[in-house]
Image (spheres, rainbow, N blue to C red):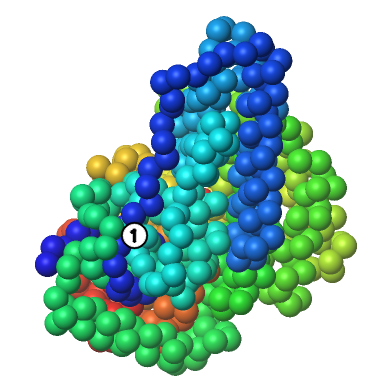
Amino acid sequence: MRTLTGLGVSAGVGQAPALLVAPAPGLPSRDPKGDLDTDLEAVTASLNKVADRLDARALEADPSAIDVLMATAMMARDPGLAGSVRTHLEAGDGPAHALWGAFDEFCAQLTAAGGYLAERVTDLRNVRDRALAVLQGLPEPGVPAFDSPVILVAEDLAPADTATLDPTLVRGLVTAAGGPTSHTAILAAQIGIPAVVRCPDVRGVESGTPLALDGVSGTVLVEPDEATVAKLAERAGRRQQVLDAAPTGEATLSDGTRILTLANIGNPADAPAAKKKGAEGIGLFRTEFLFLERQDAPTKEEQVDAYAKVLETFEAGSKVVFRTLDAGADKPLAFADLGPEENPALGRRGLRLSQVRTDLIDTQLAALAEAATRTGRDPYVMAPMVATPVESAWFAERARAAGIRTVGIMVEVPSAALRSSQVLAPVDFASIGTNDLTQYSMAADRLQGELAELLTPWQPAVIQLIEATCQGAGDRLIGVCGEAAGDPLLALVLVGLGVRSLSMAAGKITAVKASLALHSLEQCRAIARAAVAAPTPEEARKAALDLADDAVEVLIG
Ligand code: PEP
Ligand code: MG
């Protein structure tokens, strides 16, 4: 038996023989040229065919996958792509090379943008490979046919592959590449297939090899022995028992203290799915995701519709938080580009960009106010990347002038955490963004996998900044909407420090509710004190685990 390690991105244990998803055939060496118009027509027709097939798959797919498939179909129909194919044909390429070259350029742009957009490169390459197959009259690449249980093993999987998988036959997914925010990860969790990504050693595994995987810890066992599989399954069973005991409605501590458990979303369609998974509201709607893949800003009317949909999903009085445009750095916007910067993460991003492009923020605030009027709901509206009381006041004044009643800011810059009593003075609430707060307090780029040790929110310095934020907040409601909120053990520390609202990926809510229900506020405070006092992240985590209920151990992988 060999043990491989990757990143667990979709909970559950699976056991079945491996089925390799063959890599797509590459660029053909023979690429005969016709006349330019005929070649352009052939390439465009192949792209359209791929887009049509993706649309057709969307009709059969799990509802949570429909948007992703349609967005991928839109990539295939992108007019910029067709324009670039023409340029390559004019330069003398054959149709297959022109198609390849055009996609290479598109992929290079997304890779350079980094972050969320860079993870869309897999989707784009998959469109390229499918179009190339159509162009050459070959069958489309992808998952081979199978009729008995398998664990799919691939270099990476695109949404078109993942979205239509049947969880009764596909017992797991393992990819060598991919990241936690890749569509493979997101869709696998939504469909309920255990998944491990970024597991490079899986590359040597052959079809038919017995595998077992644990989508919480990221462990993949090759030719596992029975005793180990039994242990994995037993652990998964205990985890399920703890999850089954979690409250399905409102989250409370064991002493009745109310904690809001909310979801992070990037698009209105995610809201009903999050509600089904137990979200009591939305703690972070990353509204920039409505803007990201567009060449022009969405109109006010489009935005009103999107925001109203989210507000209507939850009962009146629920907490539903919209974050205003957080563009720049890893989320660049084509239509709000302020030019190249040496250090984009330290540049004009988030609120700083809104202060330059006041047209964008004013339209957005007006749309939020109109969505509030249309639905009769009271949205929470907060700004990202606030560093000073002056910025906080600037935003609060503008938001209130637009008709927003409940105004807040994100605390994700250390200066805002240290000076929270002044920075929060102009607003009603705050949400701590532990992803950026960790990046900025540890001076470690959050996209640098090699810096993972510095980037954990268990860093005692980060925990201390969260403590400082809560201490200066008075009676304002303080939430956390970074990854830290979805960790069932760290959630206890956050509550012990004074946080009363936790927002996370919807799939994590049940585990967090289960953990909260097992502890009193007094216990959470003791756990928080132990974590703050520890000198290293490992010791902070261990100190917290030692004081927590035994059941938490199976929840954290
Ligand atoms: C954060 O920084 O923790 C956060 C929630 O915002 P984002 O991840 O979108 O930067
Ligand atoms: Mg952030």
Q: Residue at image x 47%, y 45%? A: 141
Q: Residue at image x 66%, y 11%? A: 35
> Which quarter of the figure is the N terminus placed in?
bottom left
Residue sticking out furthest to the right: 374
Q: In this picture, is 464 found above or below 109?
A: below
For residue 464, what is the image quadrant? bottom left
Residue sticking out furthest to the top: 91
> Which quarter of the figure is the C terminus placed in?
bottom left
For residue 319, what is the image quadrant? bottom right
For residue 63, what is the image quadrant? bottom right
Asked whether, in this view, residue 62 is left or right of residue 459, the answer is right
SS label for mark 1: strand
Classed neighbour count for the residue bearing mark 1: other residues with Cα under 10 Å, few (<14), some (14–19), many (≥20): many
- Name the residue nearer the viewer: 36 or 152: 36
Q: Give the percent coordinates (x, y) of residue 169.
A: 44, 72
- Name the residue nearer the viewer: 214 or 309: 214
Residue to which mark 1 is pinned: 19
Residue type for callout 1: Leu
Residue sticking out furthest to the left: 1
Q: In this picture, is 121 found above or below 335?
A: below
Asked whether, in this view, residue 490 is left or right of residue 478, the answer is left
- Name the residue nearer the viewer: 453 or 386: 453
Q: Give the percent coordinates (x, y) of residue 447.
A: 37, 42
Q: Residue at image x 73%, y 71%? A: 313
State whether residue 375 appears in this view: yes
State whether residue 217 appears in this view: no
Q: Give the percent coordinates (x, y) of residue 199.
A: 27, 53
Asked whether, in this view, residue 90 is left or right of residue 544, the answer is right
Q: In this picture, is 375 found above or below 316?
A: above
Q: Residue at image x 72%, y 63%? A: 310
Q: In this picture, is 97 found above or below 170?
A: above
Number of numbered tags placed on the structure image: 1
